[in-house]
Amino acid sequence: MIDRYTRPEMGHIFSLENKYAIWQEIEVLACEAHAEMGKIGITREEAQWIRDHATFDRAEVDEIEAVTNHDVIAFLTNMGQYIDADVPEGDPKPSRWVHYGMTSSDLGDTALCYQLTQATDIIIEDCRKLGEICKRRAFEERDTLCVGRTHGIHAEPMTFGMKFGSWAWELYRDLERLRDARRQVAVGAISGAVGTYSSIDPFIESYVCEHMGLDSDPLSTQVISRDHHAYLASVLATTAASCERIAQEVRAYQKTDTLEAEEPFRRGQKGSSAMPHKRNPITVEKVCGLARCVKANAQVAYDNVALWHERDISHSSNERVALADSFIALDHMFQCLNRIIDGLVLYPRSMEANLNRTRGLIYSSKVLLALVDTGITREAAYAIVQRNSMQVWDDVQQARAGKTLRERLEDDPDCTLSSKQLDAIFDPWSFLGRINIVFDRLEELSFE
């Protein structure tokens, strides 16, 4: 991701500085675990020395890696130099206990899972915040009438608050999935070359994982199985799809011939280099574009599940890109939507105009049921409503002056409804008598 799109908090998680800091902590904890267990020669004093003197320099690690072509060895070499720097000449070097009995994946995989919990915590907070915004705006607009659309065609009246509420519920489900995915990826493994603990006691793994806030993988090979990561990537993709749904809806409302809502247009903002009048939905379009990246990266994570035997490194290169990019992109998407939805500009008069644009056709379902209630068959009722509706529809599409659906029904001798009954039917609130149940449910929704 481009740096200017990256929040410092999320960008730092996937920086080499943060990864090396986690590597350092894992190695120090492993030394402390060995000292506590007392089965090898490391003393508590040496473990404390390692704790006090362990550090690294990224530039120096890079220089060593240019020679070794192995990132873990380069890091361990650099950290060992700092650990041993102040050891008196002739004394044993405490760094000899670092990485004792471990293999590279013990360090790298445990650290990666810890990084993913750090990143997921940020996304969880992002999702929670946007969900709360959507819930608040739902109640603000619970009585703002608009037309509902199916297949892109006007259907029946609803309120704009229901749209915000629908988004809030979806984000709530995303939040639950994110929390579960965090739990499932919060695992560590320090089990040796093929997962048999041949050179390291399982106590070391338990000690390190407990202090890192991770669960021990019950049976790793040399790596932590990538189904953990694939599940998380799929949840990120689903969450991105939810963000895309919201963004795409805003795009649709901002079309000139709809114009029921639009993203905030900042002071000094320009919409087009050629057309000064333009106010384009560029931010929500960006959200839709980034969602495609996050969804595509889930496929990368799926492909990483099937590694050769106990381990290969076909996953290692791509997940350094795909996982970081998915988190950074999704975090940026949430930052955009938090601002857009919180300040989404609504146009109730346009909503009202659109509600009436089809001259009463959106009331056809209510007319149908009311006719059936008068005693005629459903087939006969349907024929009456459809015949008159198609005449109105033709007038609307041809932009001709013509009668409304109600006026045509009043003139139709087959229509068995009185003027008083038609008054009740052609009231948008006649569709919304039970809307309180929707908002009563939403009232109970908590993002804590």
Image (spheres, grey):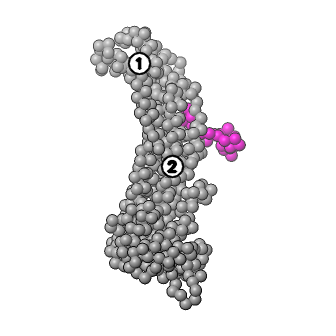
Q: Answer with left or right where residue 172 lies relative to residue 219.
A: right
Contact (Cβ within 8 Å) of mark 1 with mark 2: no
| Rendering coords of residue 190 (x, y %) | 40, 71
Residue positioned 67% across, 38% down in the render: 277
Against 15, residue 244 (above or below) is above
- SS at badge 2: helix
Q: What residue type is labelled 2?
A: Glu
| Rendering coords of residue 17 (x, y %) | 57, 67
Q: Answer with left or right where residue 19 lies relative to residue 378.
A: right
* Magenta stretch contains residue 235: no
User: Which residue is denoted by mark 2 in the rendering?
Assistant: 125
What is the magenta segment's predominant secondary structure?
Answer: loop
The quarter holding residue 253 reads: top right
| Disc 1 packing (10 Å; few <14; some 14–19; many ≥20) | many
Q: What residue type is labelled 1?
A: Asn
Task: Specify start and end residues of the magenta stretch as a single range.
Answer: 252-280
Residue positioned 35% across, 68% down in the render: 220
Whether residue 236 can be seen here: yes
Label at residue 388: 1
Q: Camera-side residue: 306 or 371?
A: 306
